[in-house]
Amino acid sequence: MNNTIQELFDRKSVRAFSDETISKEEKELIMQAALQAPTAGNMALYSIIDVQDQQLKEILAKRCDNQPFIAKAPMVLIFLADYQKWFDMFKKYTSQTIKLEESDLFLAAQDCIIAAQNAVVAAESLGIGSCYIGDILENFEANQETLHLPKYAVPFIMVVFGKPTQQQKDRKKPTRFDLSDMVHVDTYQQKTLEETEQMFMKQSGKDEEQLGKYIESFARRKFYAEFREEMNRSARAIIESWVK
């Protein structure tokens, strides 16, 4: 197993950071690595906001479901699904009416996520931990105003970076699902409920009795949750703003 693959196996989310700083050179390398990501037609349908202002970090930490570690992170990057630059160029240099639609948003979102993962992998290679913050999808209108975003630039992914504490280094990475349960050949092979339960028991380490309580607790925390209502509302607002 080479270093790159080993780092992918070792990488886990880091939410507690040591006092060690991220150097200017490390930060630039991470962002340059993001720019090397695959992108549709080399259009680079994304932009990156480097959040340096501490007050802004604290605002974002509160808006993202009150997660204080976000404000403590040495480096915070927001990856925007950004079609604005191409929209402006199309409008100037083509004679046709320009209207961006849902597929354009999805394509920009793909570029955005791929670039973010490049940054995460680059950071890991430098001994810098990271954590994705999906909650940046919430509070779209407020974030749009705070970040001065034009119509076709949407905050899609936020990632926080920092050197992990020793406790974070020692913390066991959560077990992933087995390869055999995740890969389908040619067509999707839907599992029976019993097969799905077995899949979850292997991944979670729970027996049949424990599994029910585990799933119920997980559902309350992640699915039947107030933050998800706001995320869904905000996601609809993003799409409506984009296509109107």
Image (cartoon, grey):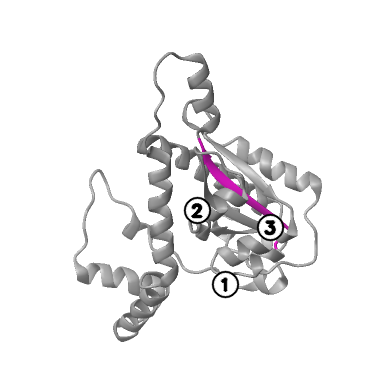
How far across and how far down the image is residue 34, in percent? 61, 41
User: For the point 60% across and 67% down, which residue is it?
Assistant: 62
Identify the disc placed on residue 56: 3
Is 77 in the magenta?
Answer: yes
Identify the amino acid type marked 1.
Lys
- Tell which of 194 and 235 is nearer to you: 235
Q: Residue at x 38, y 77 (%)?
A: 220
Q: Compare marks 3 and 1 and give the one earlier in the sequence.
A: 3
The residue sitting at 50% across, 53% down in the picture is 140
Q: Which residue is mark 1?
A: 172
Q: Are marks 2 and 3 in contact (CB under 8 Å)?
A: no
Q: Label 2 to label 3, Cα distance in Å?
A: 15 Å
Mark 1 nearby-residue class (10 Å; few <14, some 14–19, many ≥20):
few
Which is more toward the observer, 9 or 139?
Answer: 139
3 or 1: mark nearer the eye: 3
> Which numbered marker is on residue 140?
2
Is the C-beta separation of discs 1 and 2 under 8 Å?
no
Q: Position of residue 60 (x, y in %)?
A: 61, 60
The part of the chain drawn in magenta is 73-82
| Residue 1 appears in view | no
Looking at the rendered structure, the kind of residue marked 2 is Phe
Q: Is residue 228 magenta?
A: no
Q: Is residue 179 above or below residue 111?
A: below
Q: Nearer the viewer, residue 152 or 41?
A: 152
Quadrant of the rendered image containing residue 61 = bottom right
Q: Which residue is pictured at 26% across the width and 67% down the height?
A: 196
Q: Secondary structure at mark 2?
A: helix
**Under tag 3, what secondary structure?**
helix
Residue 222 x %, y %:
41, 70
Q: CA distance from mark 1 to mark 2?
A: 34 Å
